Amino acid sequence: GGSGGDGGGAAPAGLEADAFFCFTNLMAETRDTFCQSLDQSDVGVKGTIEQLSVLLLRADPELHAHMASEGVSPQFYSFRWITLLVSQEFDLPDVLRIWDSFFSDEKRFRFALFWCLSMILRVRELLLDGDFGIIIKTLQSYPDPDIEALYRGAAALYAQDKSGTLGESAPPPRTRPAPDQRGPPPFLEGVAGGGG
């Protein structure tokens, strides 16, 4: 045991060794992500980012296409998410809860990809309405800290992937007029193309 209940005593015997054991096991499982020689493989960071991109394409082709058309590479936002396990996007108590979900996954960090996918889909409308700058700002300064909703979304996406139904419930494409069919902005009505 420890030294009393005042919280100021020495750590229980073996705690440091247990923490180090857990840390070394975690690093052993994630080391391939950080090996430059494996960057192009499925287990390297670039391969993992590509897996997230493919998941987004399957889950929401319209959003994937919009982000690509705006020149938003998945590396611009997901590199930090994946390498730091979203620890920069949320407060520490939330990060601990999120990591508990990642560590308890039987495939260890596969659930992390669905967490990232859930983050993207949760701000779908902002992303679809945004240009390059808005999309990057939204994803690099994540605006929605509701980790319970993100967890539910990630769990549902993960379950769909396991059952082979990911993408079957993708939102229908939005109907927007083509840029040349929208007409002039309201402040130009009566000016542009007006009869003389």
Image (cartoon, rainbow, N blue to C red):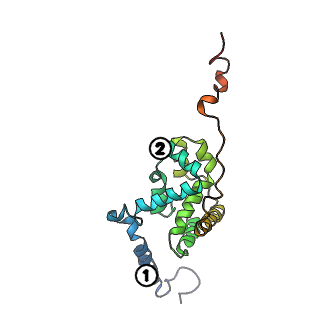
Q: Position of residue 187 (x, y in %)?
A: 65, 23
C-alpha span from label 2 to label 1: 43 Å
Q: Position of residue 49 (x, y in %)?
A: 46, 58
Q: Residue furthest left?
A: 37
Seen from the viewer's position, the closer of residues 80 and 5 is 80
What is the secondary structure assignment of the residue under circle 2?
loop
The crowding category of the residue bearing disc 2, from other C-alpha atoms within 10 Å (few below 14, some 14 to 19, many at least 20), is few
Q: Is residue 147 left or right of residue 57?
A: right
Disc ID at residue 71: 2
Can the viewer see residue 59 in this picture?
Answer: yes
Q: Which residue is mark 1?
A: 21
Relative to 154, residue 142 above or below: above
Q: Residue furthest bottom?
A: 1
Q: Position of residue 22 (x, y in %)?
A: 46, 79
Kind of residue sitting beneath label 1: Phe
Relative to 59, residue 136 above or below: above
Relative to 100, residue 170 above or below: above
What is the secondary structure assignment of the residue under circle 1?
helix
Q: Pick whichever of labels 2 and 1 is earlier in the sequence.
A: 1
For the point 59% across and 32% down, which residue is it? 179
The crowding category of the residue bearing disc 1, from other C-alpha atoms within 10 Å (few below 14, some 14 to 19, many at least 20), is few
Can the viewer see residue 91 in this picture?
Answer: no
* Quarter of the figure with residue 17: bottom left
Relative to 177, residue 53 above or below: below
